Image (cartoon, grey):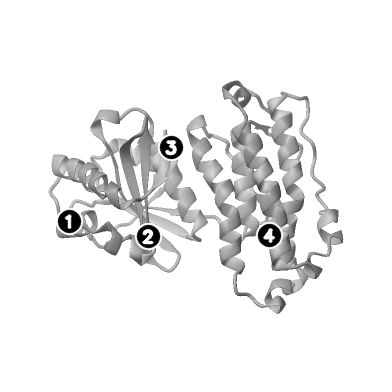
Amino acid sequence: MKIVAYKPEYQKYFEQFNRAWIEKYFEMEPLDELMLRNPDEEILKKGGRILFAEHQEQIIGTVALVPVDKGVYELAKMAVDERFRGLGAGKLLCKAAIEEAKSIGALKLVLVTNSKLKNAIGIYHQMGFEDVPINERVYSRADTKMELLLPQDIKWFDRKFDFDLTDQDFPILLERLIAVIARFEETTRGLTEGELIHKPQNKWSIKENLGHLGLLEPLWQKRFQEIKNNEVAMSPADLNNTATYRAHFNERTRKEILEDFERKRQQTLTLLKSFGGDDFRNHIIHPRLKQPMRIIDLMYFVAEHDDHHL
């Protein structure tokens, strides 16, 4: 099972799956009709996202992120084809939506649902959503509101990790590791040289943040290989970041730093794609966190590290 992005030909599934559960338990409302029939205009062109779960080359589920306010998105229209329930598609879609929200800079996710939808509510709670008061009802069926605050500006060394990932998360994480180059390119495009080398409160500049990621890529590759080989210990990082301070990234061009990072990240992706099923069972202890990490856990760790510096 994998997550794929919206295509115009997928609109029929977006409408079909959502119409099925709404009409089974409730009644279609005007906002439902508007979103389901015109997702391009009502969701995508407003800055939202629509994702789909694909199983054996068949679309079986969907979820949307709908802009609500600056930094706030509604997780909405999550539905799975009844014939494929029980495969974990709902949880996979929810995880993918959260990761997508992080990638577009969301600060908070909100959702409204109905208390009779026990399975969906269970998934939301597993993903970290918390119940909050519902002050107004956009849908008459909505009697429950939940929200999830997305971490921002937390010191990297203060981060705690719960590695509850499964093999189904592999395609989502692989896509995050692939997409980061384009995200950095887009974020830094058009900035002046002064902006690129500015060191706020004497912290790293944009160029130094980006260059740091390129420097760490060989370490990630080494650690992935160590997990595959089921070695005794994972290689430690230089917690003082000496190499980053000595690299003089502010004297290099943005293009050069990006290209170096992209080349090294492609090597990491090639390595990950070469691993097989048994490789994902191994785990070794992370030297700083003192937690066992599998390949899938380290992928998540690297993706979160990318986002931290972005």
Density class for disc 4 (Cα within 10 Å; few <14, some 14-19, many ≥20) is: some
- Viewer-nearest of discs 4 and 1: 4
Give the residue at mark 2: 48
Query: Left or right of 239: which side holds 186?
Result: left
**Residue under label 3:** 2
Residue that mark 4 sits on? 258
* Residue 200 x %, y %: 72, 73
Give the amino acid at mark 3. Answer: Lys
Going by the image, does 74 lie left or right of 244? left
> Tag 4, which secondary structure?
helix
In percent of width and height, residue 216 lies at 75, 48
Task: Please state the horizontal and vertical placement of residue 300, each as a whole percent of the image.
Answer: 59, 42
Which residue occupies the foreground of this view, 78 or 126?
A: 78
Nearer to us: label 2 or label 3? 3
**Above or below, comparing residue 8 to residue 61 in the picture:** below
How much space separates mark 2 and mark 1, taking CA atoms? 17 Å
Q: Nearer the viewer, mark 2 or mark 4?
A: 4
User: N-terminal of the two: label 2 or label 3?
Assistant: 3
Real-space Cα separation, disc 4 to disc 1, in angstroms? 44 Å
Q: Which residue is mark 1?
A: 33
Give the mark toward the camera: 3 or 4. Answer: 4
- Pointers 4 and 1 in contact (C-beta within 8 Å): no
Give how far apart the Cα atoms at labels 1 and 3 are.
27 Å
- Identify the amino acid type marked 2: Gly
At horizontal 69% and vertical 57% (from top left) the residue drawn is 259
Name above or below for residue 67 compared with residue 265: below
Mark 2 → mark 3, Cα distance in angstroms: 20 Å
Q: Amino acid at mark 1?
A: Glu
Instruction: Say which element carries label 1.
Output: helix
Q: Secondary structure at mark 2?
A: loop
Which of marks 1 and 4 precedes in the sequence?
Answer: 1
